Amino acid sequence: MIYFADIRENLMGSNQSSAVARDLYQKCREYRDSADARAQGFYPYFRCIEEPHGNYVVCEGERKIMIGSNNYLGLAQDPRVIEAACEATRRYGAGCTGSRLLNGTVKLHVELEEALAAFLQRESVVLFSTGFFANQGALSSLTEEGDAILCDRENHASIIDGCQFAPARLVPYRHNSPASLRNRLKRLPDEAGRLVVMDGVFSMSGDIADLPPLVEASKEHGAFVYVDEAHSLGVLGPQGRGTVHHFGLNDEVDIVMGTFSKSLGSMGGFIAGDGQMIEFLKHRARCLIFTAALAPAVAGAVLKALELMQEEPERITRLWENTMKMHEGFKRIGFKIGTTKTPIVPLLIGSEAKAFIFTQRLFEEGIFATPAIYPAVRYGEAIVRTSFMATHTESDLDRVLEIFEKLARELGTFNDPAYVNPTRRKNVFDFRLPDAAGLEEVRADS
Ligand SMILES: Cc1ncc(COP(=O)(O)O)c(C=O)c1O
């Protein structure tokens, strides 16, 4: 087989320098992880859904109960939301073919921004094409060299990546710890601008941010506070307004970020806050200016979903009934579910391989869930991450509990070191990308 390096050498001729540039594809050819998992029959990713129905999906021609989705309120399949997407497409076309700044703003974008600002009781809102971009755009634009972004160690990857684009220094603090935050804030130079960023609900552990003392510590030290409401919108607070409203801290928190890809059943994201700050982002955030606007179908669907979320509060009530049933049910069986307080329920499994096997067995038994492994969680503490919806029925949930109990016995889950020797906890997952050397170092040490 001829690779690029060989071709380049041929083109350059033999009288050129003998130094050969690194072959960028070498690592791709050497990448085996997914092929190995497929060969062993437990590859859990990119599963193709043939028919999505909300609480269940059809995969490989078979019905599976869906407990791996963030469709908390079941709005992604609501016929009224789908019809709103179709109507928006008929009216405004399939796409905007340009950025919001230039030719890509349609009336629906403005209506959605106004509706969200009213819902969240904020001066202004700007939409982004994804939640990931909302974090990246805001975090990279709002800080300057010499500033610091103080970041909970368990924050979502889009926050961490957003910080990499920012000129400010990234300063991690211990998960949900006001003491650690205070400590970090104290050590900053007086003149440094400071932004404290946290998930409102943490996407892996299901924890709720301990907002009151974290906000207090931030304000003591002149920091702005930024809360990512991706998993809390539609879940917490009056009418699903999120963690900030849940704690009654709307006046104290400066910036709220949210996504449409979870409770609101679609895709896209937003930043909400002070009008002048939003005006600045609209003209400075590169991933807003240099990317195409949210498709009209998406804006139409989200507007309708936002309306239904407010008109049908029974969805949130049902979501919480289902959530409490599953917390209790899993604990009764013997699973460790960590510190979750929300519909995100992480089931501790232990080793990565066991989490993959558990997920595969679930799939064979008619349940769609996904594993999370290092570096998303601590090494040796791989989980099956489950999340529950308003539209799950009692019989769906009973069946899920029955299968988890059966598989925990079959696979000896409760004998894993994560259960019998939990003191060997390794705090090694934060902010590290799974580079080969780093991963080997972590594994060797565990
Ligand atoms: C906490 C958090 N923030 C941001 C995002 C990114 O949102 P999106 O998927 O809408 O791009 C996610 C997605 O999973 C998330 O969990």
Image (tube, rainbow, N blue to C red):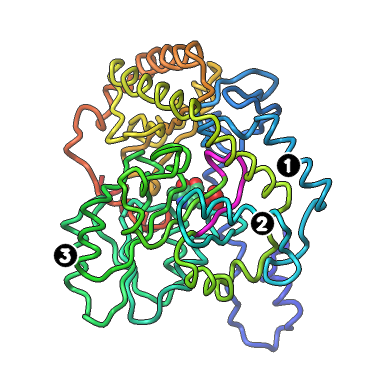
In-image side of 248 versus 280 (left or right): left
Residue located at (59% from left, 20% from top):
64
| Residue 160, placed above or below residue 64 | below
Which of pointers 1 and 2 lies earlier in the amino acid sequence? Answer: 1
Residue drawn at the location 59% of the way across and 35% of the way down = 308
| Residue 148 included in the magenta stretch of the image | no
Please, what is the three-letter code of the amino acid marked with disc 2?
A: His
Q: Which residue is mark 3?
A: 183
For mark 1, what is the residue? 85
Mark 2: secondary structure: helix
Label 3–label 1 contact, CB within 8 A: no
Query: Would you say residue 99 is visible in this rendering?
Result: yes
Report how far apart the C-alphas of labels 3 and 1 lie in the structure.
48 Å
Counting residues from the start of the chain, the first of labels 3 and 1 encountered is: 1
Residue in the foreground of this view, choosing between 28 and 306 = 306
Q: Quadrant of the N terminus?
A: bottom right
